[in-house]
Image (cartoon, rainbow, N blue to C red):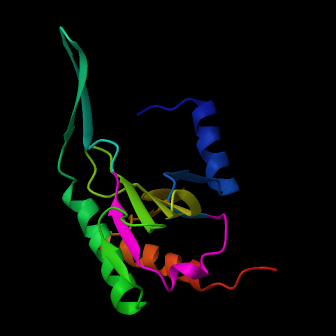
Amino acid sequence: MKLSRAGLLFLLSICISNCIFTIGDGYKEAVRKYSDLSDFKTNKIYLSVSDEYSRQVEEIKSKSGSIERITRLPLPESYMIIRDAVYYELRGKYKLDVELGPPQGKNPYSIVLTPMKPRFETSVSKVTVVMNRDKDPTYKLEITNEGWFTLIVIVPFFNRPKTYDQLGEIIAENIYKSISEKPAN
């Protein structure tokens, strides 16, 4: 392999200057709290999973007009593992009144998990958690869960993404922290 002088100088300058190259986003959390969440402690909370890819809408044209046919595909198993981990953490460890399923009744309190998993990857790359009081969003948590690779002077560091159970524990911990925080005056 022949390198030109410019290529050799470039590689030498990288090694001397200790340049750092990073690939991937790694693990990040972004939290937005819109209002006080203390009433979530005493009320029943409904936990559900939403997935934009599990719902397919077809429009069928007939002589009498067009009809929409909605087909719901089953959710991936990884989404259900995250949902179950969050459910058991909130119900068991934090002793909150949580029920699985879509919100029901008057003034329902709900937590909606929206995981996103790229088609050919084994891990969930992003999870969005939205807590609603009736239909008003009160809290939003976005977790980016991707591996990252850093190269520092030819020494690689690699961080793997979190597993489904770890994501569930982290989400439940963040939810409980936000609920038990005292409101700012």
* Front-lying residue, 93 or 103: 103
Question: Residue 46: percent from the left, percent from the top?
Answer: 37, 70
Decide if residue 98 is on the left or right side of residue 130: left
Is residue 146 at all visible to an observer of this figure? yes
Question: Residue 5: percent from the left, percent from the top?
Answer: 61, 32
Look at 57% across and 80% down and name the residue there: 39
**Looking at the image, is 107 positioned above or below residue 74?**
below
* Front-lying residue, 160 or 116: 116
Q: Is residue 48 magenta?
A: yes
* Front-lying residue, 38 or 73: 38
Classify the position of the N terminus by image quarter.
top left
Question: Residue 100: percent from the left, percent from the top?
Answer: 29, 71
Classify the position of the C terminus by image quarter.
bottom right
Question: Residue 125: percent from the left, percent from the top?
Answer: 39, 54
Image quadrant in which you'd find residue 94: bottom left
Look at 22% across and 53% down and name the residue there: 75
**Looking at the image, is 26 positioned above or below residue 53?**
below
Tally the numbered discs.
0
Is residue 153 at all visible to an observer of this figure? no
Q: Is residue 184 magenta?
A: no
Q: What's drawn in magenta, residue-wise?
A: 32-50
* Front-lying residue, 3 or 50: 50
Look at 33% across and 90% down and name the residue there: 92
* Residue located farthest toward the top when viewing the structure as drawn: 63
Image quadrant in which you'd find residue 108: bottom left
